[in-house]
Amino acid sequence: MARYDNVLDTIGNTPLVEISELSPNPRARVLIKLEGLNPGGSVKDRAAKSMIEEAEKNGNLRPGQRILESSSGNTAAGLAMIARVKGYPFTVVVPENVSLERMKLLQVFGAEIINSPAAEGSNGAMRRAQALAREHPDWWFSYQYGNPANPKAHYEGTGPEIWRDCPEVTHFVAGLGTAGTIIGVGSFLKERNPAVSVWAVQPPAGETVEGLKSLDEGFIPPVFSDNDGYSLLDRSRVVGPRDSIEWVRRLADVGIFAGISTGAAMAGVARCASEIDEGTIVTVSPDGGWKYLSTDVWTGDLDDVADRARHELYF
Amino acid sequence: MTVEVRVPNILRPNAGGEASVKAEGETVGEVFEDLVGKYPGLRGSLLTPEGEMHRHLNVFVNDDDVRYLGKLDAKVGEGDVVTLMPAVAGG
């Protein structure tokens, strides 16, 4: 279908593209789902729409009520876009070290932006939003890290789309942020075929801003723990900025212009491909490269860019 | 086997203030025993009273989570890097 009643109806049903030419193992096929093609520019449109519509349905979100969230950018963009369309005011806490484009995008949709300290990362932004939610009980806090409508968007959308388009999938590899994608898609695929292996990729924690204590505080999203994420996963690996950026550049060889977390996912895919004998690996590209152009990811010296990426949030 | 253990900030006060320490062992469990021998203050952060790996501690051998490689029985090789890491959130 190419004609829609409303931009929100264009969320989801993203293309799944074969990129096996990038696989280090000729017997391991690789397919990537391009979530950057959602109208708000990322996979987070799915969670944003699901959280808002679920809250409208159960009466937690009323017409004109202010929406509150913390986000390193993509969830914020999705919520800002949908809030604007549906007429809700929106306040978002964003760590000050996200890329310039992410901040600008939020301004496009008229979000009220509150910056939290770079040193405190995504966890600091979340704590600030939790404090704001306590101060303003009349606002609706979508709380993506603990909202069941977040993984539900992937259980009912992303997962079934992958199964429809690629029932031969043997491995699913995805980044771990709120854990919404991996929990929703992973649970759905394993229900359909328990032999599907689910691999998580995460950024290095303490390294992001070396020497700053607050980042060492552990936080496990309720979306992950409430759904017994540790049992769902079959493998979990850390991927650093340098590997991620190398893979983002390699993706350009097959015409895919993606954000840095896609590079991290691809680094995970490459390791998966080299460890298995044969199979079909599916991964998710959370967003396109547009929001990272100012960071010289494609054009700068690899060491310089990797070093800068340690100080910038990209998941 | 000698491995390098990377210690997060939050655990450094219990590891002589070091960001990286050397330890010996053939498995993650043996590396932990060696570490706890040198830095007894680390025991409570690494192991439960029953001697199991702490559920909310992430341990990586060369960036691979040992939870899926046999936990304390996960093998380590000469020169491997064992990273102790708390959970992290994005979004």
Image (cartoon, rainbow, N blue to C red):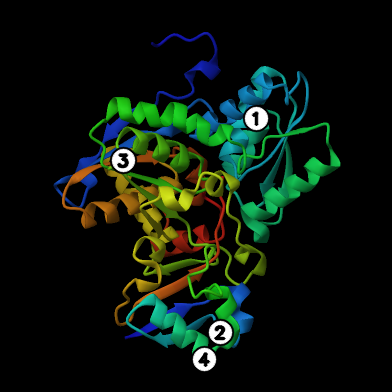
Location of mark 2 (residue) = B18
Left or right: B61 as drawn, with respect to A110? left
Residue A144 in picture, x, y percent from top left: 61, 39
Q: Nearer the viewer, mark 3 or mark 2?
A: 3
Residue A61 in picture, x, y percent from top left: 73, 24
Kindly report the distance in space between the C-alpha atoms of the residues bearing marks 2 and 4.
Answer: 12 Å
Q: Give the residue at the far right of this rendering.
A: A135
What quarter of the picture does the N terminus of chain A occupy? top left
Kindly report the distance in space between the C-alpha atoms of the residues bearing marks 1 and 4.
Answer: 52 Å
Residue at mark 1: chain: A
Residue type for callout 4: Lys
Q: Which mark is residue B38?
A: 4
Q: Nearer the viewer, mark 3 or mark 4?
A: 3
Label whose residue precedes the other's in the sequence (2 or 4): 2
Q: Quadrant of residue A219?
A: bottom right
* Viewer-proximal residue among A200 and A102: A200
Q: Nearer the viewer, mark 1 or mark 4?
A: 4
Q: Nearer the viewer, mark 3 or mark 1?
A: 3
Kindly report the distance in space between the C-alpha atoms of the residues bearing marks 3 and 4.
Answer: 43 Å
Q: Residue at x 60, y 49 (%)?
A: A98
Residue type for callout 2: Glu
Figure check: A194 above or below A79 = below
Residue at mark 2: chain: B
Kindly report the distance in space between the C-alpha atoms of the residues bearing marks 1 and 2.
Answer: 44 Å
Q: Give the residue at the far front of this rendering.
A: B50
Whether label 1 touches label 2, CB < 8 Å: no
Residue at mark 4: chain: B
Residue type for callout 1: Ala
SS state under label 4: helix
Q: Which mark is residue A194?
A: 3
